[in-house]
Amino acid sequence: MHYETLVTVLDEGIFTLTLNRPSRMNSFNQVLLDEFHQAINEAEQSQEVRCLVISGGEKFFSAGADITEVNKISSPFHGYAFSRKFQECFGRLEKLGKPVIAAVRGYALGGGCELMLACDFRIAAEDARIGLSEVNIGAIPAGGGTVKLPHLINPLKAKEMLCFGKPISGKAAEEIGLVNKAVPVGQVLTEAYSWAKELAQKPPLVIKTIKTITALATKDIESLLHYEAQGLGMLSGTMDFAEGTAAFLEKRSPLFKGI
């Protein structure tokens, strides 16, 4: 299938999805979200697909949600629905009965980081910049990041990343267990495909069962995701949210007032 914002390739059981909005730093707009969802459905239904590799560009894995759309959130209900759409899209990767590998180069910020968190395995460039920076625009990571990060790494480190919004390197992400392996940027895709080729040879039903069982360890996450979406909905009605997103688009420092 041809996509406007994705490039897909199926080769020897490995289905590669490459984000393709370079002019917008591979940020997610509604078109990319919809196409990503369709591509996951395509992978799920295909008997040929044994493993997925999610990639972006060399400089940007993904800069997250497209702020031109975030800035247009007009009500708490709109904010809640916006959050849920991201959560459900990325959640499809976690529910997919096939292994998914993130090949991260460059910046993986906000929703880009949340996409990475939804993958089963993560290979990152040592100099990649990974983080959840929504606090800097008066919002929270509402595509699953606020909920999932404390489950994946030390909660103290997770709170630091969430509250300061500063990205960390791929090497640092490996040290705290946020990615499986950090390698030089030129080796990221090679390493990811090496993992994918090995996983593609494993028994599919065993892999699916392992994913199902390990997901049970965080079975309360779905209810927490609703709280996360409600949090973005509440914040989207504040002046700080409007100021933060506007300041980002105007390339200036925001002035937050707590209202």
Image: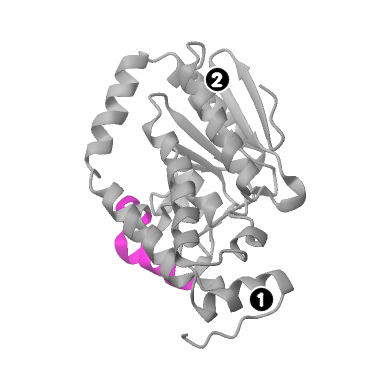
Q: Amino acid at mark 2?
A: Ile
State left or right for residue 33 relative to residue 259. Answer: right
Query: Which is in the foreground here, disc 2 or disc 1?
Result: 1
Question: Along the line of sight, which residue is nearer the eye, 122 or 29?
Answer: 29
Q: Residue at x 53, y 53 (%)?
A: 111
Find the magenta span and give its range: 149-166
Residue at mark 1: 247
Q: Quadrant of the N terminus?
A: top right
Where residue 17 sits, quadrant-wise, is top right
How far across and how far down the image is residue 4, in percent?
72, 35
Q: Amino acid at mark 1?
A: Ala
How far across and how far down the image is residue 36, in percent?
57, 36
> Does residue 152 appear in this view?
yes
Most prominent secondary structure in the magenta stretch? helix
Residue at mark 2: 14
Q: Secondary structure at mark 1?
A: helix
Asked if residue 60 is positioned above or below residue 241 in the image, the reply reads above
